[in-house]
Amino acid sequence: MRQIGDPLPPSCTRGDDVDLGMLRIAARRWMKGVEERRRQAAAWSFTAAAIAGYVKARGERLGRSLQVSPLSLALTYKLDQWAKDIADEIGSAAARLPFEEASYQLCATYTGLLPDALRSSLGAYYTPPPLTTRLLDLAGEAGVDWASARVLDPASGGGAFLVPVALRMRERLSDVEPNAFLEHLADHLAGFEIDPFAAWLTQVWLEIAFANEAKAADRSFPSIVQVCDALDQLPASDGFDLVIGNPPYGRITLASHQRECYRRSLYGHANLYGVFTDLAIRWAKPGGIIAYVTPTSFLAGQYFKALRGLLASEAPPVAIDFLQARRGVFEDVLQEAVLATYRREGKVGEATVHFLGLRDGQAQVEEVGRFRLPVDVSGPWVAPREPHHRALAEQLTRMPDRLA
């Protein structure tokens, strides 16, 4: 077995091509040698070094230097030379990728190095670019106007949604001069994130994506993400046109004041993504869209009956994509997932249902049919997951007593 301190194996390099996957595996093996209590600090130091390597290599490829905001957190773990070299190689390899894939790979490097318990408590399983693109497409189909929409990601992670949202805003506002565009982003883009390092990652990717605008405007990129517990934030009076994201999931013991605040959507124990769905309803303006990637369990699970009732009355579904694959989508976790859009104070009607597959890094979308909410809206929501399920789903929605 290769030891720390040995050179990279030949399988990691192919001429100028570096196998990023092998480098990330090497980094995780290195992390196993770090004391458990120091792994978060080590993950910060390693990822910061990888970001520095990316910024340097990206600047070289662009023919100019790039500057990003320094990390305000103290890096208390000192990397050995071997780890520094691996981090730099990861950053350099990522600089050869398309921008959004590079940001995902480096953010996933960070989450993959976190201690398992901490990663689980943070819900740090970031969304791959094809799913991000598809969810933004669903939001657009629901009526979100990227030129004017105010957008919130209440669990922004490493910027998986805020960065591509900002890029779509740039496309729609291509004729707006740089300073005015940066002011637009400051007014129309917002995020909450409990992990300060992840919040910094979001800022870094935004600064890299809009380095030209910041240089032309001769100003720094505005701060977009607030480091906080989103569950403790009071909703803005004017609301957002779009609340989007991949909220954390897993059972949680809420503080007493949080449980009281969110009790309308709770039935039994609390799950983070259910509470974040309630949060999204509070932050979306009337007519606004909620676009979330979540597990499928809310559709029929007994503990989500209050949430289903709340969604039906406050934000009925517009469209649902069932993700066909469980393996190889979210790193290090097997999870059935759906991409769904909801409209705050929308009319209860039929929602469009699609299959969503991933092939060669691209989303493959197939429309399956439509489904209606059952008469008992807190009961299971039965949606067709295959074309021949449509008739059965429609029959079941008319038989709520048998679904109880």
Image: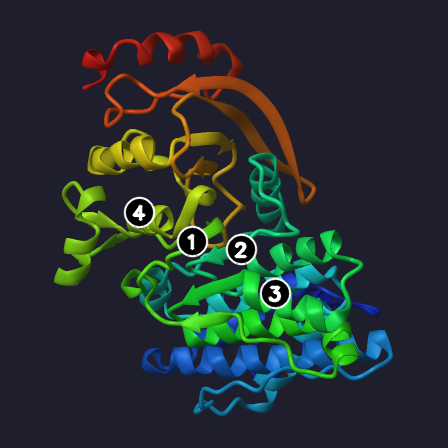
On screen, residue 212 above or below 286: below
Apparent side of residue 382 relative to residue 163 in the rendered image (left or right)? left
Cα gap from disc 3 to disc 2, whole angstroms = 9 Å
Q: Amino acid at mark 3?
A: Leu
Residue 118 rendering spot, x and y as whole percentages: 34, 68
Label 4 or label 1, whichever comes before in sequence order: 1
As shown in the figure, which amino acid type bears the numbered disc 2? Arg
The amino acid beneath tag 4 is Asp
Q: Which mark is residue 185?
A: 3
Q: Residue at x 42, y 70 (%)?
A: 114
Residue beneath disc 1:
239
At label 1, which amino acid type do we have?
Gly
Quadrant into which the C terminus falls: top left
Looking at the rendered structure, which numbered label has been put on residue 278? 4
Residue 73 place in picture, x, y as percent: 45, 86
- Residue at the image point whose x is 30% and y is 46% from the top: 274
| Residue placed under numbered mark 2 in the picture | 150
- Gap between marks 4 and 2 measured at Cα: 19 Å
Residues tagged 2 and 1 counted as in contact (Cβ below 8 A): yes
First in residue order: circle 3 vs circle 1: 3
| SS for callout 1 | loop
Q: How is the image coloured?
A: rainbow
Which is more foreground, mark 4 or mark 1?
A: 1
